[in-house]
Amino acid sequence: MLFIKNISLCVLLMLLIQTNIEDDIVKTYNHLNKVYEYGFNKDFDSAKIHLKKASLFAVRSKKKELIAYVNIYKSRLLYWEAKTEEAKSELENLIANKVNDTLMVKLKLLYGEICIYEKNYKKAITSYIEIEDIVKENGVVKSKKDSASLYKGYNNIGYIHKKLNNLKKAKKYYKKAFKFAPSPNSKSLLLFMISNLYEKEENIPQALKYITKATQFASINKWQLMLPTYYSDLSKYYIKMGKGDSAVYFAKKGLENNTYCRLNWLNDNLGKGYWLKKEYSKAIHFFEVALNYTTLDESVEVHQNLRELYTETKKYKKALHQNAIYLKLKDSLDGLKIKQEIFEITEKYESEKKELKIELLNTSNENKELVIKKQEAKILIFGILLISFVILISIVIYYYKREEKKKHLLYVKNRELVKIINVNNKKKKKEVFVEGEKKNEIKNQILDLITDEFYLKKDATLTKVSKLINTNTSYLSKIINENYKKTFTNFINDLRISFILKKLESTSEYRKLTIEHLADIAGFTSVNAFYRAFKKHTGLTPSYYIKKRIEQN
């Protein structure tokens, strides 16, 4: 009887111990959930409190795998605190202890994530590739969880290759990840990223194919978070293909029931779509709407588009106004970019400086002081040269861009002046001279010669014109100087250049002619004379002006 009682007590005690163990396991997982929650939100103190409690319950349960699982969370917390060396050391110890396959996969995933953060892409890829060997048995994935792990691994390898601009490999691994994607939304995102890679390769038909598939998957769950982005990309690709109707259709689809997402891109695409359709007032309207949502660099592009649009529609005053805004914003943006570049290089310099100092601490005490001085001198010289180089490059870029802006502004102004000159010439013809009869006669004869385009003849010299209007060269020079404030040579050259500008503006065939041909038509005896006169009159070279005019079309 006593024996039976003892057995009963043993069974009861074992059940009690088992219950306590199960209770400890539940408590461990509950605290680990809190570790993740607080750690993710950067509340590391609270996360550490729960990590300590999770560790106590795991140790009390005497479950080795559970203790290892807690240590994985510890590594993640260290990683979130940017203590990557400690995090990796913890994971390497766990890997050395040969935990089960499930935990090993988690270890490898986290290790790869940390290596990506450190930009040690080779180690990250190795870690993810090793997962494939663990989760596959005879080429077949063991479980649904393993499929999810493969999806994460392949997805991250794709991301690494994208960062390194290995577009072909990035596509390969994104497509491998697609086979194991756990949901329509995951598949949709992968297709979206593949589409972007094809866009980078300028393979727009393939980019369009994949973004269309991405949109179909996102539509299954009505994924409003991403659908506006997908519709925006669809619109963008049709713009690149010159299909205005489709571009407008998909941009409008993206704006349906959408009050917050990608409003900058969608309205900008509507502007570009209507521009392609030559519905200029609608294009201007949507560009202006886009400006309510754009970032600084996006605003620069929108103002540039408005400038070109107003120029194309011959609204030159508005074009000049948009050009002024564009130049101001561009200067501001360029300044920010230069500051960012200097900051990044300075940060790199400081980082290398720290690494060198760490390396120096490990040198022998005997040579330490001498080596430190030499290395610090190298660091200083390297830093000075690097910063000097950046400043020099920044100055060159700044002056180059400033000159380009000046040239573009001159181009816009010259196009406007073509119209003004035509109007002024008509007014001149209608003037009534109240001066002496002879002077009045000479002035009218000059206007007649201008109307007859006599200046286009190569022999339109001061002597020749004097003979044609029955006066002497001195008196003719005096009248031209008084009336036009120019020497005879400048007067003739300006008329010739104005003629060429008018033809370049109104007749597309003239834009296809060579500089030599244009010089000949204008009456110049040499290309160099034409080049100098054009530059003096407009501030631009003939080739630059023609190039910009062709770009307007």
Image (cartoon, grey):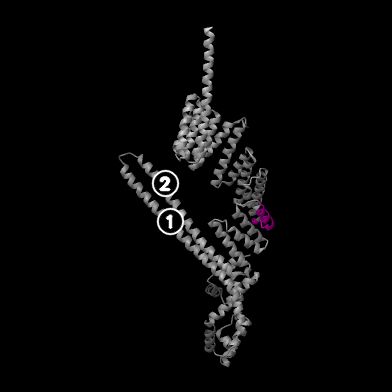
Q: Does residue 542 appear in this view?
A: no
Residue beneath disc 2: 351
Give the SS element for disc 1: helix
* CA distance for labels 2 and 1: 18 Å
What secondary structure is the magenta-colored segment mainly? helix
Which residue appears at 47% of the width and 63% of the height? 399
Q: Quadrant of the N terminus?
A: top right
Q: Residue at x 47, y 54 (%)?
A: 340
Tell me, for residue 389, which label it has, or none.
1
Above or below, 150 against 390 in this view is above
In the picture, which quadrant includes the C terminus? bottom right
Mark 2 vs 1: CB contact within 8 A: no
The disc, 2 or 1, on the residue closer to the chain's N-terminal end is 2
Eyeballing the image, is 53 above or below 307?
A: above
Write the residue at 68% across / 61% down. Answer: 277
Region of the chain picked out in magenta, as a range: 239-253
